[in-house]
Amino acid sequence: MPLVYDPPVFRPPSEADSLILQVTIGCSHNRCTFCAMYRGKRFRTKTDEEIRSDVAEARAQYGANVRKVFLADGDAMCLSFHRLAAILELLNEAFPRLARVGIYANARDILSKTDDDLAALRRGKLKIVYLGLESGDDVTLAAVNKGVTVAEMVTAGTRARAAGLATSVMVLVGLAGVARSLVHARLSAEAINAMGASYTALLTYTPVDGTPLFGAIEHGAFAVPSPRESLVEIREFVSAVTIDTYFTCNHASNYLPLVGRLPRARTEMLACLDAALAGSIPLKPEFLRGL
């Protein structure tokens, strides 16, 4: 029988060719005011028996040559070190050519692991963690009920990198609203610099019906930056990133696609942003934007 998933299932764009293995269902935090990804799910961890069955089914369905696996759902890193290590061992046994395992993680789940734990997971072929920084501004993180501080995020990212894990860190353009837009951009760049993110991804906040932040927008308590204001925010961010990081701003939510390695590509990116701000480059229309 084919693998059965508990939908919806989300994965980073770079995991498009990976086997998706759900080891948790939903998100253990699930209280961010802007996010609706897992609001329809009640969080739980899959049993060892369920996971063994899923891996066996994946092996039967796809053979032994699977090279990339992504552990879902929203923060599978919340599993204990021992359970994660056992899952990695199971995957390595089932797929001898396995090259990389990726996982969504939040700060508290990384911080709950020791340095030795993280290094052991890396030896088990966990090679990349995806972190939703969202903002480097503590005021904004508190406002959206992220549940962690910037300092915790930076420490988590730094410790992951020290253990040999690549870090892909997401920042959400527009999350601070109009009032704190540029502060959010500058402080987010500072956080990226401090944690030494391997990859940095900018997405643009898109209001989702049914979330608390959507309600605040409807009642006039939160002002979403305009497309132009979003570009100004991105420009501020790009100007302030100083570390070597592979930067993407090409998600479906973004008005203007940008891809390149910072700071090397900064001049080219700023010129593109300035041209878009001057009206020389068209922006993606709203009907083509998505989550």
Image (spheres, grey):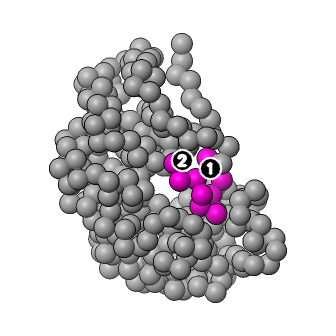
**Residue 211, quarter of picture:** bottom right
The image shows a total of numbered marks equal to: 2
Against 277, residue 87 (above or below) is: above
**Residue 107, quarter of picture:** bottom left
Label 1 CA crowd tier, 10 Å (few <14, some 14–19, many 20+): some
Question: In the shown orientation, is residue 203 left or right of residue 260?
Answer: right
Mark 2 to mark 1 CA distance (whole Å):
9 Å
Q: Residue at x 41, y 14 (%)?
A: 60
| Residue 274 in view, yes or no | no
Asked if residue 70 is among those painted magenta in the image, a careful observer would answer no
Q: Residue at x 75, y 56 (%)?
A: 210
Q: Residue 91: give x, y in percent of width and height.
A: 31, 28
**Residue range highlighted in magenta:** 28-38
**Which residue bears the numbered disc 2?**
27
In which quadrant will I find the N terminus? Answer: top right
**Which residue bears the numbered disc 1?**
37
Q: Residue furthest right?
A: 219
Q: Quick check: marks 2 and 1 in contact, CB under 8 Å?
A: yes
**Residue 247, quarter of picture:** bottom left
Q: Residue at x 24, y 49 (%)?
A: 118
Q: Residue 116: give x, y in percent of width and height.
A: 17, 50
Which three-letter amino acid code belongs to the residue tagged 2? Cys
